Image (tube, rainbow, N blue to C red):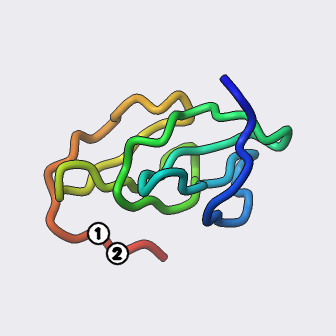
């Protein structure tokens, strides 16, 4: 996959950074390559191996491979 070139981004957490491309969020590694392709409408950084993401207007949790550990089912999630 091509490296990330432009768009909004968050700081790195646990080696990955959330970045926006074409109105969807995904995650890149420190070399700028997508590890998790843009597919989410909202994201948070990783903590203890998981990140909160929004898909289809519901929030869930993914691991660093982009696999849902907790399927999107929540209307609201608060991170600390």
Q: Residues within 10 Å of mark 1 (few under 14, many from 20)?
A: few
The residue that disc 1 covers is 77
Where is residue 53 drawn, in percent x and y? 37, 53
Q: In percent of the image, x 18 and y 56: which residue is there?
A: 58
Left or right: where 33 falls relative to 38 = right
Question: Distance from label 2 to label 1 (Cα)?
Answer: 4 Å
SS for callout 1: loop
Cβ atoms under marks 2 and 1 closer than 8 Å: yes
The residue that disc 2 covers is 78
Q: Is residue 46 above or below residue 79?
A: above
Q: Is residue 17 above or below residue 49?
A: below
SS for callout 2: loop
Left or right: where 68 falls relative to 26 = left
Residue 53 - label:
none
- The quadrant of the image that shows the N terminus is top right
Q: Residues within 10 Å of mark 2 (few under 14, many from 20)?
A: few
Note whether residue 47 is visible.
no
Q: In percent of the image, x 16 and y 59: which residue is there?
A: 74
């Amino acid at each position: 996959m091509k490296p990330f070139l432009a768009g909004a981004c968050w700081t790195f957490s646990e080696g990955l950074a959330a970045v926006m491309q074409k109105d969807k969020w995904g995650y890149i590694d420190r070399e700028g390559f997508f590890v998790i392709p843009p597919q989410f409408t909202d994201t948070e950084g990783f903590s203890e191996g998981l990140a909160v993401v929004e898909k289809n207007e519901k929030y869930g949790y993914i691991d660093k491979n982009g696999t849902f550990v907790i399927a999107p089912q929540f209307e609201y999630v608060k991170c600390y």
